[in-house]
Amino acid sequence: MEILKLPKVELHLHLDGSVRTKTVSEILNLDIKEVKRKMICDKNTKSLTDYLTKFDLPLEILQTKENLKRITKELLEDLKKENVIYAEIRFAPQLHTKKGLSQEEVVESVISAINEVDSIKCNLILCCMRNDLLNNNINNLKTIKVAEKYYQKKVVALDLAGDEIKFPTSKFIDLFKNTSLPLTIHAGEASNYISIEDAVKMKAKRIGHGINIINNNKLIEELNKKNILLEICPQSNIDTCAITNKKNHPITKLINKIPISINTDNRTVSNITLTKEYEDLINLCNFSIKDLKTCNINAINHAFINEDEKRKLIEIIEDEYKEN
Ligand SMILES: [Zn+2]
C-alpha cells in the first residue's frame, strides 16, 4: 500500500514551523543552504533552546498580509500533495504583529488565503502564548477576542503554546474561563503529567503531545472517560529532545490505551511529512495500516467540525484503508 496516497487527517500543525525554505530564501534573499541550516533540526540541535531558534527566520517574514497569504497557500499545497483531506492549522496571531499588523488583520489574511484555496478542507486554531503571562496576558486576551469574532468562520478553537516549564499550565487555568470556544492545550511534553491534569481542569478537549502521561494509568483512565485525544507528534518529540529514540516512543503503548492522532507539528523544522511519520511508525514502531486508520478515525472524531462533516471524512478513510 502506498502511504503517500492514503487519505490523512492532521490536527496539530503550526504555520510558522511549516514554511518552505525556498520561500524564506527568496523573500530574504538568503542562500538556501544557510536557510536550511537555520530552519531545520539536525544533529546540532541538542536542546529545546536550539529547536526554538528554527522559528526565527520564518517569523521574520510572517509579518505582512502578502507573506501570510502566500505561506498559508503553500502549506495547503504541501498538504494536498500527500492527500491530507482535513487539517487544523494553528498559529499565534500575536507573533505576527511586529510590522504593525493587528492580530485581527493577521487572522483575516490567513482566512482569506484558505478561502481562495478550494482543494483541501481546513480550519484554524489560534494559539495563546505562555510567555504573555509576563505581560498580564494582554495579547492572549486579544487573541481570545479575535478567535471569538471569527469562530465558525474558519477559526474553530484556541490553544496554549510555549514554554510549559517556565510558565506552567496551572498559571493559565483562569485565562479561558470566560470563553466557550473549544480548547486544545500543549501539555505534558517538556513538563510532567501535572501539566496534563491542569489542561483537563481547563476542560481541554484535546492535548497537544501529552506523552508524559505514559506512566500514569489513573490519568490515562480519566482522559479515556472524558474522551480526550492526545495529538502525538513523534518526530517533533525527538527534535525537542523530549524523547531520544523513535523506536521507544510512548506512542507504541499509547495506541492501545487512549485515543491518539498522528501529526507533524512543524513540517519544516522537523523536516517531516505525515507520510514519513506513518512510514516510521510502520518500520520502527510496529504500526499496522489498521493502527493508522484508527488514528485517522480518532482525529476525525475529535476534530473541531460538525457531525455531518465528520461522517463524510470517515467514509473516505473507511473506503481507502484496507488491512494488508
Ligand atoms: Zn505544537
Image (cartoon, rainbow, N blue to C red):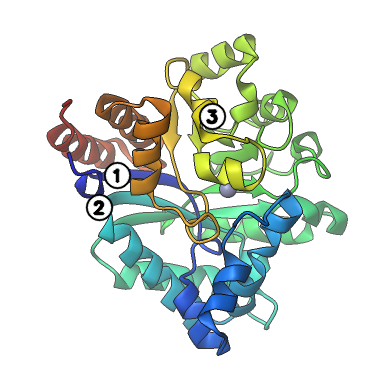
Q: Amino acid at mark 2?
A: Asn
Dot 1 corresponds to which residue?
A: 8
Nearer the observer, 144 or 126: 126
Of all residues, the one furthest to the bottom in this rendering is 29
Q: CA distance from mark 3 to mark 2?
A: 25 Å
Helix, strand or loop at disc 2?
loop
Is the C-beta separation of discs 1 and 2 under 8 Å? yes
- Marks 3 and 1: which is nearer the front? 3
Instruction: Check disc 3 and report its element: helix, strand or loop.
Output: loop
Task: Say which mark, if any, is on residue 131.
Answer: none
Front-most of residues 323 and 224: 323
Q: Quadrant of residue 170?
A: top right
Outermost residue on the front side: it is: 43
Give residue 239's position: percent from left, percent from top.
61, 48
Kindly identify which residue carries mark 3. 249
The structure residue drawn at horizontal position 55% and vertical position 61%, both measured from the top left corner, is 17
Q: Would the CB of label 2 be found within 8 Å of ligand 1?
A: no
The image quadrant of residue 306 is top left
Nearer-N-terminus badge (3/2): 2
Which label was assigned to residue 83?
2
- Judged by depth in the image, the label closer to the viewer, 3 or 2, is 3
Q: What SS does tag 1 mark?
A: strand
Mark 3 and mark 2 residues within 8 Å of each other at the beta carbon? no
In this rendering, does residue 65 appear at all?
A: no
Residue lying at 44% horizontally and 53% vertically, measured from the top left: 272
Q: CA distance from mark 3 to mark 1?
A: 21 Å
73 on left or right of 17? left
Q: Residue at x 67, y 57 (%)?
A: 44
Q: Residues within 10 Å of mark 1 (few under 14, many from 20)?
A: many
